[in-house]
Image (cartoon, rainbow, N blue to C red):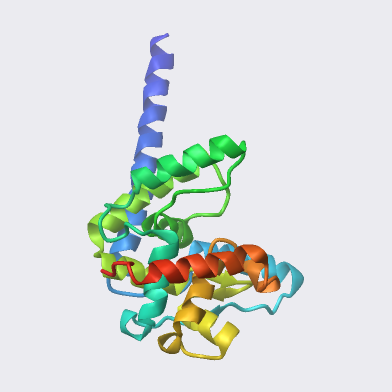
Amino acid sequence: MQRAVHWFTRGLAVVAALFLCIQLWFLLQVVNYKYRPPGETAFMSYRLSGLREKNPRAQLQYRWIPYSRISVHLKRAMIAAEDAKFVDHEGFDWDGIQVALDKNWKRGKTVAGGSTITQQLAKNLFLSPAKSYTRKAEEALITLMLETTLDKERILELYLNVIEWGSGVFGAEAAAQHYFNEHASELSVDQAARLAAMAPNPRFYERNPNAPGVLKKIGIIRERMNSAELP
């Protein structure tokens, strides 16, 4: 019995040490992203693997640009669409989470997530799209790291540069050129609202640009953009 307890304790210690090492690695990466842009995120790698199963030569459309060269209309549109309380919360919008839970319970399925921009960034940078309690727990820890290490402007800059906007299309610059043949700095109000409306399901809306859902969202986002607060 004593030997079993001994080995169980040692096993727990190994698991705890491994967990701490993983969290330290994530933290070091977050600190690195405070000063340097990501070359490729976990989500980009996941999508690229899928594309290369069909075409071994497939490449992603991704080009980093600084915050100052992203249209203010797109910044406002994304905050209006994804996270109205972005500048005020510390990574989690508890009211938004409760609203999402209530909506999902009434519908009997997941129709709303309640994730903030910071939570989405944590997932895109480091995690897979697979849904599990373990992944959500890790997402929460990384969200705390992002919020305590980076300022809001840097979080939004990273988010707008790595978010998926179509099949193999990542970031504001690639999206602006892919859909409008424009630079991200030149996006109009209407173009920004469309990109924000596409964000929850970009590959579907890329194939179905006139779907009723996206057209309805564009109008709602345009109405909310003026009240969106930027960092």
The location of residue 179, given as percent across then percent down, is 59, 83
Identity of the residue furthest to the top in this view:
1
Q: Is residue 176 visible?
A: yes
Residue at 56% of width from left, 66% of height from top? 45
Residue at 43% of width from left, 69% of height from top? 223
Residue at 32% of width from left, 66% of height from top? 155
Picture quadrant where residue 52 is located: bottom right
The location of residue 212, given as percent across then percent down, is 66, 65
Residue at 32% of width from left, 52% of height from top? 91
Residue sitting nearer the eye, 64 or 202:
202
57 to 40, vertically: above or below: below
Picture quadrant where residue 131 is located: top right
220 to 191, vertically: above or below: above
Picture quadrant where residue 110 is located: top right
18 to 42, vertically: above or below: above
In screen coordinates, is 54 left or right of 62? right
